[in-house]
Image: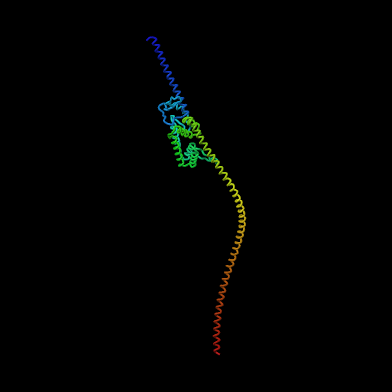
Amino acid sequence: MNKWGIGLLIVNLLAAVGLTYYALEDRAKRRDINAAVARYYLALHGLPVDGAKISGDSVDIHIETANGVPIDGIPVKVLQTYLDAPGGARFGATGDPVTTQFAEVNRVVQQVNAAVGGMNTPREKLAFLAGSFANPGGRRTFTPGILVYLARNADDRDAARELAKNPNGENAGKALQIFSKIAADVTTPGADSVVRSRVAHFLTSLEPTDDGWQKRVALVVGLRTYLKAISEQDLVFQDIANRVARRYEDDQATFVAQYQLLTKLSIQRSLLLSRQEEIKNELDVQQQKDSELLNMKKSSKDKSVKIFEDLSKEVATQSAANAALESAVHNSQRTVGQLLDEILKLEADLNAVEQQRNKGR
């Protein structure tokens, strides 16, 4: 081969290497562009509702781009980088990233069930699910649970508070049933916008005060749906706040009416109490007089008893003397009787003697 052939071969080889380099460089750039587009799409719309799975090193996510060129699948590392928000201590995620919104819902539902299953008392379970009442310093306060934050209206919120009032096993079971039903309704198939709204409301309401969790929810459901869910939740809270305000107004009006009634009743009772105190004082004076009179009566009774006892003794003594006198009189009468009998007998003898004497003359 002459030198021109060798040179041409070298040029062709260099050209092939250059084309290969540019092709690889273009593919890498396209991969980077697709990753950027995927992250932009996910940030706006969130993860797919259902269906996406991890296959090897990629995730089969279908994305319709603005220029009409779809993206079918993204690397797992891109999804991991995008979901760089563990979600806080309570519902934090570990391991492989979730690929759908339903997967995220099922993950946190499992965590809630595991947390409730690990609690020993109904009070703990209700405090976690419905909320708990406390009375620090004499003022009753309420710490809301998951069901209160998940409430779609004031009635749902009041129902959760009612369960928290009696922390027993029955109410703890009802609270868990309500949560399970809400979670099942969230994953019920339906129109894409409706399902996304349900998922966003469910996830944002689990930990509304945790910034780490809210960041993760925004990445899972997308900023558009997240902002819409927050706006809807704001309207719900406004409605609840308005109902609470109306209750305050009604309670205040009821309190004013009752206070006026109680004020009148208090005045009446005060006057009645004053009159009762006057009567009590009069009765106390009368009782004092009665006590003095009673003491006098007792003293008179004691004197009468003493006189009676003395008279009884005198009567007893006199009776004894009378009995002795009667006995002496009786003896005297018997003696007189005997003497009369003897006198009569003597008179009879005397008469007989006189009669004989008269006969002898």
Q: In this figure, which colouring scheme has been used for the structure?
A: rainbow
Q: Position of residue 267 (x, y in %)?
A: 60, 48
Q: Position of residue 53 (x, y in %)?
A: 41, 29
Screen quadrant of the N terminus: top left
Q: Based on the displayed image, in which of its 4 quarters is residue 105 positioned?
A: top left
* Quadrant of res 99: top left
Please state, as top left, top right, bottom left or bottom right, where the C terminus lies in the image.
Answer: bottom right
Percent of width and height locating residue 209: 51, 34
Q: Residue furthest top?
A: 2
Between residues 297 and 122, which one lies in front from this camera angle?
Answer: 122
Which residue occupies the foreground of this view, 86 or 344? 86
| Residue 255: x %, y % from top left | 56, 44
Vertical comparison of 165 with 84: above or below: below
Direction left: furthest residue: 1
- Looking at the rendering, which quadrant does residue 283 occupy? bottom right
Considering every residue shown, the one lying at the far bottom of the view is 361
Q: How many marks?
A: 0
Q: Is residue 317 above or below residue 166?
A: below
The answer to whether residue 341 is above or below residue 83 is below
Q: Nearer the viewer, residue 129 or 317?
A: 129
